[in-house]
Amino acid sequence: MKSLEKYPEDKDLLQRHRSSVTQEEVASTSSKCKYETLQVSTKDNITKIVLNRPMKKNAINLVMYREIKQALEEAAKDDSVITVVTGSGDYYSSGNDLNNFTENLEQIIKNNGEWIKNFVNHFIDFPKPLVAVVNGPALGISVTLLGLFDIVYATNRNRFLTKQLTRCFPLITRTVQAVSFPFVQLHMTGATMSVSQEDFEKASAQLKLLKTDPGNEVKLKIYALFKQATEGPCSSAKPGMLDFVKKAKWDAWNSLGSLSKGDARQKYVELVSSLVSESSSQVKDTTAERKGGYETIELTTKDNITKIMLNRPEKKNAINEQMYKEIMQALEEAAKDDSVITVITGSGDYYCSGNDLAGFINIKPSEMEKMTKYGGSLLEDFVNHFIDFPKPLIAVVNGPAVGVSATILGLFDIVYATDRATFHTPFSELGQSPEGCSSYLFPKMMGLGKANEMLLFNKKLTAWEACARGLVTEVFPDQTFQKEVWRRLKTFASYPRNSLALSKQLIRNTEKEKLHAVNSQESKLLCERWQSDEFMNAIVSFFQKKAKL
């Protein structure tokens, strides 16, 4: 544990803590000293498990795996009320100790995963409240386990990294500066991830590979981060007003304030890497492989990304029967090709305006039942293609999303949206009912009341509202939307294909059967709604209003 004396702002707290700890209290602390990689103690009904390999950033080796299981078994049986897991030093845990794993590779392979299954089961089965006090960066398994804790407290400068393509979810219960327990006061510094000096020097050399001038603003940022990383905060005298170049450099450096050398190195490497990547992509052949045979969509593959673009901009990308079939065909092709990820977006100002309702106007009354059953079957098959899609599926929502184009977003793995996008499901207004598994997924991700606002009462969400409710992963300013999103997607597409696909299956497979059942129920109800007087009256009213505009 770091001494509180290092943090001037906590001197009063330290003094109160010292004065409150009596000899009797010190004696009453039960410290278990039989561990090599942990510190385990019990005091005031709290069992505290401290990951104690600070020189290795609390990386978890095979010994620590065994000792954590043992500590949890003891904590489950002792008289404590809660159990707390935290880390010593600047890190919570840097994940698995890969060097240790390499040394014991034969033993690990022979075990066939049983050891990790048994380890995780200890957290699943732990009978008491389990609290994580995340005092610094958390990587790999130390992140993924947090979903099994009852409460997670974290410093506000923390980082969580799994090195996999994952959707953001609310791991953290509360972000705090300091967490107080009756026994200890932890001041959590939350040191950020740092890169090595070798990485930093390599990034400096890579600057020479840039094929295009990044512009003065970016060059000033590079200069400032380099100075901060090598010399620390700006300490030189401010140049005179007429020395424009030196003053611009000084201002850029000074603007970084007290940013640590490690953080500056990290930001420097990230910035240079993004510039080199962008420059390289510009030099490469920019022609994407375009696949023909489609009228309502454009299907292209480039840089390990298959892009499906809804391409009826004059109809606001409304989905007619042909587009339904072509999207399904495109998903089948994308599932089998060599791409790593698949992206769906829209052409023009709209992402998609939902179903093309004009198709309902020309149906003869005698054919209504037959056509609605066909439509229901088509929709069910369409949604099933999203449920079963094996690769990471990402929506790039470039404008308003209406009806089915909004409801199926819950089946995507990531949803990025421009800040001018809106999300609208006017089912009740049109005499219809929810589809795309939204009757199940929306309440699950938003809560029942918020989901009902959309699905029952036609509430239109802004991009920011959709993000707050969990429907959208991240919102971007419209003017930089395409550039920022596609830069990120290219990074995702560089990840190992099989790792992403298998990880997605692991995440999604537990609910596949449920989603198929929900999809079937929704499609059957929609068939009934499409044959109702309410629906036909709503459609007639819709086109009458449209004609008056």
Image (tube, grey):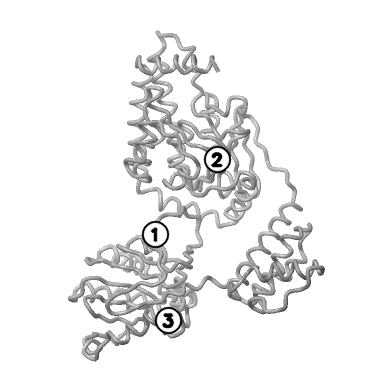
Q: Specify few, some or many for label 3: CA neighbours under 10 Å numbering under 14, 14-19, or 20 or more.
A: many
At 65% from the left and 68% from the top, the residue drawn is 255
Q: Specify few, some or many for label 1: CA neighbours under 10 Å numbering under 14, 14-19, or 20 or more.
A: some
Q: Nearer the viewer, residue 500 or 525?
A: 525
Comes first in the chain, label 3 or label 2: 3
Comes first in the chain, label 1 or label 3: 3
- Kind of residue at badge 2: Val
Q: Specify few, some or many for label 2: CA neighbours under 10 Å numbering under 14, 14-19, or 20 or more.
A: many
- Which residue matches tag 3? 53
Q: Quadrant of the N terminus?
A: bottom left
- Kind of residue at badge 1: Leu
Secondary structure at badge 1 equals loop
Q: CA distance from mark 1 to mark 2?
A: 25 Å
Rendered image quadrant of residue 218:
bottom right
Q: Quadrant of the C terminus?
A: top right
* Residue at the extreme front of the image, as rendered: 241
| The label number, if any, that marks residue 171 in the structure image | 1
From the top left corner, tell me how far across and down residue 156 is, in percent.
Answer: 45, 66
Secondary structure at badge 2 equals strand
In-image side of 11 versus 30 (left or right): right
From the top left corner, tell me how far across and down residue 123 is, in percent.
Answer: 30, 66
Vertical order, 534 against 316 (above or below): above
In-image side of 240 versus 225 (left or right): right
Vertical order, 448 against 381 (above or below): below
- Which residue matches tag 2? 397
The mark closer to the camera, 1 or 3, is 1
Q: Is residue 344 visible?
A: no
